[in-house]
């Protein structure tokens, strides 16, 4: 399926989806290797993950202690941007201080297709490896790598935090990121799309062991790409590099109490980075979000 999203003219559809994954809490180079394994032979997938994980990459957490967010930049010289960067994420979105950008009204495309998915626990969050398509923003094609969850939410809107934030990760060949954020509030209705893989999130005793969940279809992946907030920021975990276009959807979706309880049974502690200063940056929106 294909719908309008973002800004710029419509490109020709990519000939193939690139196998790129984020590093650290995001879909890492390790997962890039695993994705190659998926595309060639699923049998090798788990072995690659088990043998290529560098434990030093996990020497950080979300606590108030010495390995927490306030100290990430001190843990590794390559993570200094976490402490010194001026365009860090997440942020609070103040809806009274937005900038209308008419360029965001121009049509662009994204497409997600049915493809095999794997869910894993990386010790910090639940990740779903799902190279299901691509998105086109500001003249660039970004290949989807999958998504991950944070509870409570990393981004806030007018100071309001949400029980769950889903981050859909896309990446260019050059290593730039486009992340789409879906915020969810607790409702009695079970989120049927998430239910396809939710109960298979591995426990902390099974870190980096991917669990196949079969083909995941975008059908039911109800995302309103017409109403959103856009800003430039960073990755929200080490190394906090500042090459991310963030798109925070303004429509809030549902997650059931039982689904939140299951996630917290696996990750009992909060896994959200604190809000970062906006500084001189602007948060933009299209006409449909007014």
Image (cartoon, rainbow, N blue to C red):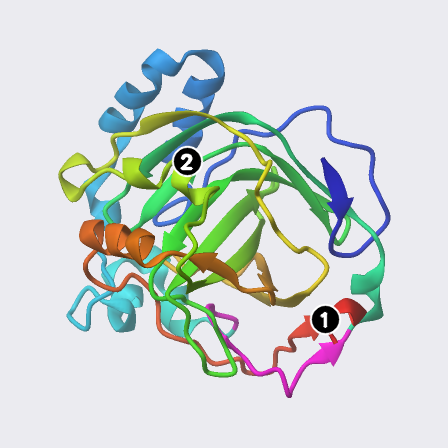
Q: Residue 216: image x %, image y %?
A: 50, 30
Q: Residue 247's image quarter?
A: bottom right
Give the overall secondary structure of the magenta segment: loop
Q: Nearer the viewer, residue 8 or 126?
A: 126
| Disc on res. 63 | none
Q: Residue 161: image x %, image y %?
A: 41, 74
User: What's the distance in space between the residues labelled 2 and 1, CA to CA?
Assistant: 30 Å
Q: Earlier in the sequence, mark 2 or mark 1?
A: 2
Question: Is 99 a magenta residue?
Answer: yes
Please determine whether, in this image, residue 246 is positioned above or below residue 98: above
| Disc on res. 289 | 1
SS of the residue under disc 1: helix
Please determine whether, in this image, residue 67 is positioned above or below residue 169: below
Left or right of 275 in this view: 200: left
SS of the residue under disc 2: helix
| Disc on res. 196 | 2
Left or right of 200 in this view: 229: right
Q: Is residue 137 visible?
A: yes
Q: Residue 106: image x %, image y %?
A: 85, 58
Question: Is 110 a magenta residue?
Answer: no
Q: Nearer the viewer, residue 20 or 81?
A: 20
**Within-10-Å neighbours for mark 1: few <14, some 14–19, many 20+:** some
Q: Nearer the viewer, residue 5 or 188?
A: 188
Q: Quadrant of the N terminus?
A: top right
Q: Residue 252's image quarter?
A: bottom right
The magenta-colored residue range is 87-100
Residue shown at the point (64%, 88%) measured from the top left? 96
Residue shown at the point (58%, 36%) measured from the top left? 218
**Within-10-Å neighbours for mark 2: few <14, some 14–19, many 20+:** some
Q: Farthest residue to the bottom: give it.
A: 96
Q: Quadrant of the C terminus?
A: bottom right
């Amino acid at each position: 399926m294909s719908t309008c999203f973002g800004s710029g003219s419509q490109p020709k559809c990519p000939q193939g989806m690139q196998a790129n994954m984020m590093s650290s809490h995001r879909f890492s180079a390790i997962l890039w290797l695993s994705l190659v394994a998926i595309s060639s032979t699923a049998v090798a997938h788990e072995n690659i993950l088990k043998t290529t994980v560098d434990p030093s990459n996990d020497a950080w957490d979300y606590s108030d202690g010495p390995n927490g967010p306030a100290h990430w930049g001190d843990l590794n010289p390559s993570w200094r941007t976490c402490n010194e960067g001026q365009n860090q994420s997440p942020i609070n979105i103040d809806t009274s201080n937005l900038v209308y950008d008419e360029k965001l009204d121009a049509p662009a495309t994204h497409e997600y297709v049915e493809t095999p998915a794997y869910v894993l626990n990386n010790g910090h969050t639940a990740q779903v490896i799902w190279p299901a398509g691509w998105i086109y923003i500001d003249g660039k094609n970004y290949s989807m790598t999958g998504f991950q969850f944070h509870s409570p939410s990393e981004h806030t809107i007018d100071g309001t935090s949400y029980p769950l934030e889903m981050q859909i990760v896309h990446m260019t060949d050059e290593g730039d990121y486009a992340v789409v954020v879906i915020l969810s509030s607790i409702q009695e209705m079970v989120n049927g799309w998430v239910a396809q893989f939710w109960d298979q999130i591995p426990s902390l005793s099974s870190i980096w062991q991917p669990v196949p969940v079969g083909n995941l279809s975008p059908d039911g992946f109800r995302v309103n790409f017409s109403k959103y907030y856009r800003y430039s920021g960073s990755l929200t975990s080490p190394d906090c590099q500042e090459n991310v276009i963030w798109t925070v959807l303004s429509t809030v979706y549902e997650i059931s109490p039982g689904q939140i309880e299951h996630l917290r049974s696996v990750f009992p502690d909060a896994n959200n980075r604190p809000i970062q200063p906006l500084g001189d940056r602007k948060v933009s929106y299209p006409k449909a979000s007014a």
